[in-house]
Amino acid sequence: MAPRRDILGVALIALTASTVLTTFIIGERAENMVELLENTFPAVVSHDQRNTFSLALIARKPTGVLEIEISSLNRVDTENIDIEMGIFGRDAMMSLDSIKSLIHMSEAAGVEPVEYEMDVEWNRTPHDLYVMDFTDVLVPVLDDELLAGYAVTGVSTIYAGVFNETGLALLFSGFRDFFPLRNVTITEMSISFNDEKETFKRIKELSPAEIASGVPTLLDAPPLGRLQYEDLEKDDTIRLAFSVDRSTVPYLENLELVRIFADVELEEQLANFFNT
């Protein structure tokens, strides 16, 4: 007996609906929890511009905990460092004396460093980046202001090696924070959550009356370059922006690392190279 056309029609509609639903679910699951809207920074920090760094993102799904980590690194002079070429990534980093010392501290404290790698572009050429972050090893024993160097030079807790086809090409070191010497170099910083905005200013930008009244300074900004938000709803937006005074920047070649986590999972990581 030939199948009835109405039964075939119902089956076809059901199959089509099932396919659409499956595609929708897969697409929904594949979508990131958050989307990066803005990542701007000056390629060269100069005297004749505001030198603004900005980062903005939007929640694409309800998110329990959102974390943004920013680290500031500067290029290390490797002229007097014995570097073995032909080895890469973790093996190459582990051959450096400064890394070995931090590894010993890490093992003694029972805290493992955070390690990750990225594909980056240096001078318009693809390179590999390998990062070893020992911040969590030293946070329990050092004050945040001393560790990140809010007004004095901080402690090097992060090392990043840039590799080409022959081995280690560049080495950067630094710490977690928005910018080196934040209360000296940053003139003003704003952190916005939807329509709510907080502003922090360098102390020298404030009058004695403003300081006495408790106007927030860069020392009051979130510690260690870390922003955290809880219970985000879909379409909540976050924006960070700060401007840098070129005359106070201590280093010539710099690297900003940005990592964004949603409910513990890594959503985005960025490596921004810039000079002064």
Image: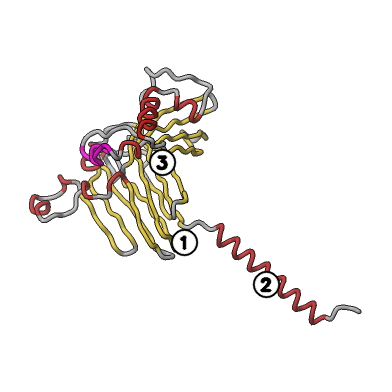
Find numbered disc 1 in the image and state the secondary structure of the residue it sits on. loop
Is residue 173 shown left or right of residue 11? Answer: left
Find numbered disc 2 in the image and state the secondary structure of the residue it sits on. helix
Range covered by the magenta-colored residues: 141-151
Is residue 51 shown left or right of residue 160? Answer: left
> Which x, y percent locates residue 157?
34, 34
Residue topped by disc 3: 272
Cα distance between the residues tagged 2 and 1 = 25 Å
| Residue pictured at 27% horizontal, 42% vertical | 48
Q: Amino acid at mark 1?
A: Arg
User: Which numbered mark, 3 or 1, is in the foreground of this view?
Assistant: 1
Find numbered disc 3 in the image and state the secondary structure of the residue it sits on. strand
Residue topped by disc 1: 60
| Residue pictured at 24% horizontal, 55% vertical | 199
Sooner in the amino-acid sequence: mark 2 or mark 3: 2
Please, which residue is most extreme toward the right here? 1
- Which mark, by number, is residue 34? none
| Residue pictured at 68% horizontal, 69% vertical | 18
Residue topped by disc 2: 17
Residue closer to the observer: 177 or 143: 143
